[in-house]
Amino acid sequence: MRTAIIGFAIGTACLQQQAALPEPAVLVAGVAGLIVFLVAGHCLFRILSQHGSAWAVVFISQGSAVWPRGLIKLASGVAGFIAGFLWAAWLAHRAMAPSLAPDDEGRDFIVIGTIDNLPYRFAQGVRFNFAVERVEDRNGTAILPKPVPPRIAISWYSGFRDQRTDVVGDVQPGERWRLTVRLQRPHGNANPHTFDYEAWLLEQGVRATGYVRADRDNRRLEAFVVSAGNLVERSRAALRSRIELALDGKQYAGVIVALVVGDQRGIGQSDWQVFNRTGIGHLVSISGLHITMVAGLFALVALTLWRHSFFTGAQLPLLLPAQKVAALVGAVSALLYVLLAGFGVPAQRTLYMLIVLAVALWCNRLADFSHVLCTALGVVMVIDPWAVLWPGFWLSFGAVAIIVYATAGRTTARPVRLQPGEAQPAEPIYTRAQAWVKQLWPALRLGAHTQYAVTLGLLPLTMLLFSQVSIISPVANAVAIPLISLIITPLALAGSMLPAVLGTPLLVLAHALVEWLAACLVWFSGLRYAVWTAPVPPWWLFCLAMSGTLWLLAPRGWPARWLGLATWIPLLAAESVHPAPGRMTVTAFDVGQGMALLIETSGHRLLYDTGPAYGPDSNAGGRVLVPYLRARGIGRIDGMVVSHSDVDHAGGALAVLDNVRADWVLSSLSSGHPIAQAARRHVRCAAGQRWTWDGVLFEVLHPLAASHADAALKSNARSCVLRITAAGRAVLLAGDIEAAQEAQLLARDAGRLRADVLLAPHHGSGTSSMPAFLRAVQPQTAIFQVGRRNRYQHPKKEVYERYGELGIERLRTDRTGALTLDFGPRLEIRAYRQTNARYWHDR
């Protein structure tokens, strides 16, 4: 059974790596083949069991032949793999089926439906998922069949661009609304080592995104639509509101909300950075540890009350054993808590394990822990085959597997139990304390060993998933685990559910403890070597390190366990890859409507622009550039060019400077600009500046130095234009210059504009890319860094066609994802949406 479940999980994971889903006919053939395989295997097993075989190894057990276990496990594993692949493919077909037609993108729809998740409020408005029940025209007539997917993600903005609305609706889960919305198909930025937004939407069942349009008829139709899901989400919303009201204006109110209802969206990015650097991010949510604690607490109360028959003398244990009652109460309380948590993978894993243990107890069966873990794995895979795409899945099941491996079968000192009369109150305090220490010592020792095993056991996996490991994590967790799990979480739960007069003081106390803990964590994270970073390892290096880790955690008596540490050396000491001398690699990121490129030589790195700001707390620097640089093991860049001050070019600069050391910043910004102030060294760009790195020539062609004194000049006109030449080929990075600046460049030195690759000026706007300029550059390829369906309609149709008429290859990052260009004897270009294609990607 365990082998089949593991095979099922591997098959499910394999499906998620496919660029396209198998056709329905292939799925039917696969199911038929699986049935034939199972029937044939069963028949062969019966034949071998009854008659034996000259070519099969036969064991005699109680007088009957038994087929070799190895072959049975192999067959069950293969069957599980096929079943997992087919099951995941079928669910993927069902999830992908409801979609918005391409012709309906940008069209307004009148939809009626319910708010079916916990809305997230931010500075510009509110965001929520909407379950569509009906689509109407302006006359109120239903449009059939519905052109809108059954579940969509909606943002409702206040005073935002062309869909200006004065008031954002006070939406609550379970309400039925009539809204006018404008939709588009699911689409996210596609870059290496970054969050896959399209996969996340697919897992949530969301097949279109959009925003609410200004309309007088936008209104609430019903205050609450009764359903189990709506009831859960409304309960979560009520608890969140209760906490936010009690902790209004408190810095860590979002942490308390996360511990109670699992909504982590209120935690700031700066706080997450501290939590991740100290390795306690897993505690700032409803984790398996918290669920187990809550289930254990309710089970203990139920056990005590049932054993004492609620102090009535009814002899209830004679009717039903107290252990079974405790197991049932614990499983039910865990289920309720997991529903409040939003049903995340770690919470699911813990819930299913507790349910399996409860069922085993009720059936009077002893449950082997490996069977329990595999059963939980199988249930998660059946319900949510996309869970394998997220780090939480691997860390959750990996941590439990490591604990089982490192502790199962180990001998531990037995706790010393006090004998009657020992350590009586009349004895000295020292004697009583000594007795309690004897009792607590085995538990403390087991806890320390478990933390040691988890820290070491997950190190290779942590490096694979995050390209960093917290050195200070064991110390931080030693403080945070008991404080959060045993004190803060119970206080937060009690405070959110008790009447306000009793609950508010408890919430305030819980918040005060979080503040104290956060102060300690800030100090821990500020230590110089709090975090060790290295590039994401290749699969073979990860497997080597993981095998060494298992060797290291083997039981005592295993020979030379310390040699397992040697397998970590290539994992932790790896360095990022560089191009060969004289060559250059350029990565043009998919950051939406903005620019950001990384230029690499054999010994240096330069970042040209940093992408847009998406909101007050979100930008391309934090969401795209920093994760990419960290995954590559790049903690330092030699320079950064910020072409000009527009937010789509400079929006991510501060986030990059906060996380990555940049030796200098070259820009057209004033000395008082926040980016210039944050730079270690700031220099204004001016035509004529040039330098050489590793045989690669960098030349600044624009603006003139005198232009910085012209206050009337637009920021676009002062864009830093950079030409880079490597291996006889050149790339021209033109920023947001327009026709006037293109003419100036042509007048000054048209011969220096020649380049094989051109970053289209101003994203292909109608005021740039003049024919004379393109003829002077003569690019082989043009890159348009644009956002899909951006409001500026970049690149303009006539400009885009102009490039095509000149025979220039046109690449748009909204269609290709990130682009990697290798400048060598020949120019090689790789598009992320092609080399890492997945069936859910918008292509």
Image (cartoon, rainbow, N blue to C red):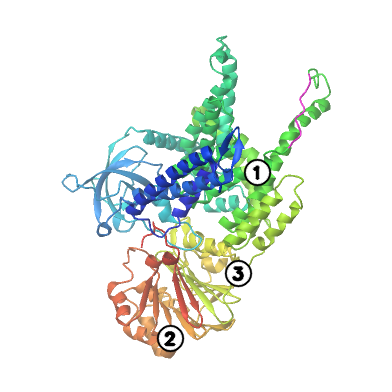
Residue at x-position 47% and y-position 60%: 619
Question: Which contiguous range is marked in magenta?
Answer: 411-419
Q: On the image, numbered disc 1 is attached to which residue?
A: 405
The secondary structure type at the circle numbered 3 is loop
Mark 2 belongs to which amino acid? Answer: Leu
Q: Earlier in the sequence, mark 2 or mark 3?
A: 3
Question: Within 10 Å of the Cα at label 1, are there few (<14), some (14-19), or many (20+) other Cα atoms?
Answer: some
Amino acid at the residue labelled 1: Tyr
Front tag of 2 and 3:
2
How much space separates mark 2 and mark 3, taking CA atoms? Answer: 31 Å
- Regarding mark 2 in the picture, which secondary structure is present there? helix
Closest to the camera, between mark 3 and mark 1, is 1
Is 418 in the magenta? yes
Q: Residue at x 47, y 73 (%)?
A: 643
Where does label 2 land, which residue?
753
Q: Is residue 153 visible?
A: no
Main SS of residues in magenta = loop
Q: Residue 325, percent across and down? A: 54, 22
* Residue mark closest to the camera, 2 vs 1: 1
Pick the residue in front: 44 or 138: 44
Q: Nearer the viewer, residue 82 or 672?
A: 82
Give the quarter of the image for residue 469.
bottom right
Q: Which residue is mark 3?
A: 680
